[in-house]
């Protein structure tokens, strides 16, 4: 399928090797039948005959102001021209693919230099495309650059691609590798990677082009229209509303954050808890789970606006999970009609492995009840984790590990869970290690789970 491509480069000079890679890639895409638009501040040399070169008029004396102006022009062009893919040879927000030949700025700039406006802007540009919440694929001929990106931005390994004439074991580098033939130049190798990427079905590209909304925000009229969506309200509390709506026959959920308010914001900080003020938290969590190859919600778009955190507005749109049911519903009859041991063990093993993977990455759901796991009805042994608005990375994990495990244990009480089930969960979660090695942890989990049960009984819930 022929696509509209947008290439971005700060300046082009035919005398530099780096620009040769750029021009080689453009010619490959043109030869494949794609239409190409190029946005740059300066062009020195012959222009590709079949490509349209947009020389953006420079604004502002400092270079970093000119780069910011170019980024705004590209963002506006994406909305108007509806490009299928944006490829950048310099780091600017909104890219789908980034050719990272320049050194990582976060690795080079240290100390007080980070406070300088030009470096602040370049760090912000890098973060917008290299952070875990971004969908941008990163391709580089330098393994050193890719390692620096992964170290400083924790970019998912599945988004990093190394173009090299040599071979390298993935287990040693912890990044994906796109191997080249020895008679190819790096520019031709990047062109091959790009054409392979464009041939993928759109649904296989992480988050799709709508992910650009996450970094730039969307047009004010679009933002207002989404914040005023109407549909079946599923939840409405603490400045956050979740509703279901339909668009072109497909179901979606919108999570609209209108601001927690100053009182709620202050109460959380006085309680030494960071308040959840935006849908960005859930956007990051979805990106993390997808990077770990775990089933979860399919995010469509996210945007936010507002400088003051307690007044910040944001939204997150996700597709409805059609053929799935909550584990609360699935296990409803287990107490009266216990399933076979194989069925119980299969469910316990998959839940334990799912929780173990996210906990090993030091990510915690912080509201991990059975109702937040959905079982796929059309696929065997597939489970979705939902309601991720509180899920976060925590450096010190002990307290949050106990909180998640105790909540999961407590929510299983009413479904006939027995000690054999508990021990099998522990066996799967710990990777087969003996119970006595983590006896203190599991005792605290059981104690907290029973405290949750007592509190629920006092309130008349259970």
Image: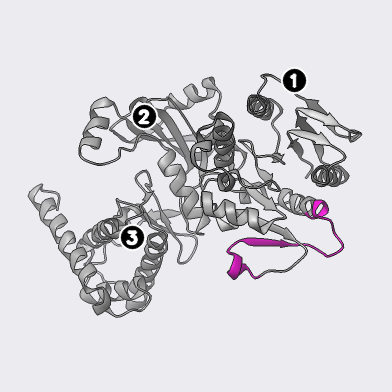
For the point 65% across and 24% down, which residue is it?
62
In which image quadrant can residue 175 be found? Answer: bottom right
CA–CA distance between discs 3 and 2? 39 Å
Read off the residue under disc 2.
309
In which image quadrant can residue 86 be found? Answer: top right
Mark 2 falls on what kind of element?
A: helix
Read off the residue under disc 3.
330
Residue 458 — which label?
none
For the point 71% across and 51% down, which residue is it?
197
Which residues are drawn in magenta?
169-189
Q: Picture coordinates of residue 292 (x, y %)?
A: 50, 59
Q: Earlier along the polypeptide chain: callout 3 or callout 2?
A: 2
Mark 1 falls on what kind of element?
A: loop
- Residue 255 placement, left or right of 194: left
- Viewer-proximal residue among 88 and 454: 88
Q: Picture coordinates of residue 37 (x, y %)?
A: 79, 33
Q: Earlier along the polypeptide chain: callout 3 or callout 1?
A: 1
In magenta segment, residue 174: yes
Question: Does residue 419 appear in this view?
Answer: yes
Read off the residue under disc 1.
57
User: Is residue 385 depicted above or below 443 in this figure?
Assistant: above
């Amino acid at each position: 399928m022929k696509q509209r491509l947008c290439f971005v480069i700060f300046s082009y000079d035919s005398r530099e090797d780096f620009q040769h890679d750029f021009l080689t890639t453009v010619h490959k895409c043109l030869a494949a039948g794609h239409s190409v638009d190029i946005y740059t501040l300066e062009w020195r040399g012959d222009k590709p005959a079949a490509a349209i070169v947009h020389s953006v008029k420079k604004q502002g004396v400092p270079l970093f102001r000119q780069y910011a102006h170019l980024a705004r022009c590209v963002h506006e062009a994406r909305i108007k021209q509806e490009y299928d893919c944006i490829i950048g040879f310099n780091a600017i927000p909104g890219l789908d693919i980034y050719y990272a030949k320049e050194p990582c700025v976060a690795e080079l700039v240290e100390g007080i230099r980070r406070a300088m406006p030009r470096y602040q802007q370049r760090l912000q540009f890098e973060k917008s495309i290299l952070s875990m919440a971004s969908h941008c694929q990163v391709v580089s001929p330098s393994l050193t650059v890719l390692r620096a990106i992964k170290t400083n931005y924790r970019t998912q390994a599945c988004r990093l691609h190394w173009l090299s004439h040599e071979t390298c074991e993935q287990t040693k580098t912890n990044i994906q590798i796109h191997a080249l033939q020895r008679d190819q130049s790096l520019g031709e190798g990047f062109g091959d990677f790009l054409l392979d990427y464009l041939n993928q079905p759109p649904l296989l590209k992480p988050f799709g082009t709508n992910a650009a909304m996450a970094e730039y925000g969307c047009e004010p009229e679009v933002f207002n229209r989404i914040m005023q969506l109407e549909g079946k309200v599923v939840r409405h509390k603490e400045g956050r509303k979740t509703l279901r709506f339909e668009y072109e026959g497909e179901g979606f959920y919108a999570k609209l954050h209108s601001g927690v308010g100053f009182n709620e914001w202050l109460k959380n900080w006085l309680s030494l808890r960071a308040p959840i003020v935006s849908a960005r938290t859930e956007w990051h969590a979805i990106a993390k789970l997808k990077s770990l190859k775990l089933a979860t919600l399919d995010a469509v778009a996210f945007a936010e606006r507002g400088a003051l955190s307690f007044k910040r507005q944001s939204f997150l749109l996700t597709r409805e999970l059609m053929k799935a049911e909550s584990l609360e519903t699935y296990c409803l009859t287990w107490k009266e009609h216990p399933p076979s041991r194989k069925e119980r063990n299969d469910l316990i093993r998959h839940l334990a492995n799912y929780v173990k993977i996210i906990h090993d990455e030091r990510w915690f759901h912080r509201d991990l009840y059975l109702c937040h796991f959905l079982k796929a009805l059309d696929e065997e042994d597939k489970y979705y984790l939902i309601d991720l608005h509180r899920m976060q990375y925590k450096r010190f994990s002990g307290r949050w590990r106990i909180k998640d495990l105790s909540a999961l244990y407590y929510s299983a009480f009413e479904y006939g869970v027995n000690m054999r089930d508990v021990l099998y969960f522990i066996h799967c979660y710990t990777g087969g290690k003996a119970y006595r090695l983590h006896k203190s942890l599991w005792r605290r989990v059981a104690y907290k789970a029973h405290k949750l049960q007592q509190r629920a009984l006092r309130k008349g819930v259970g």
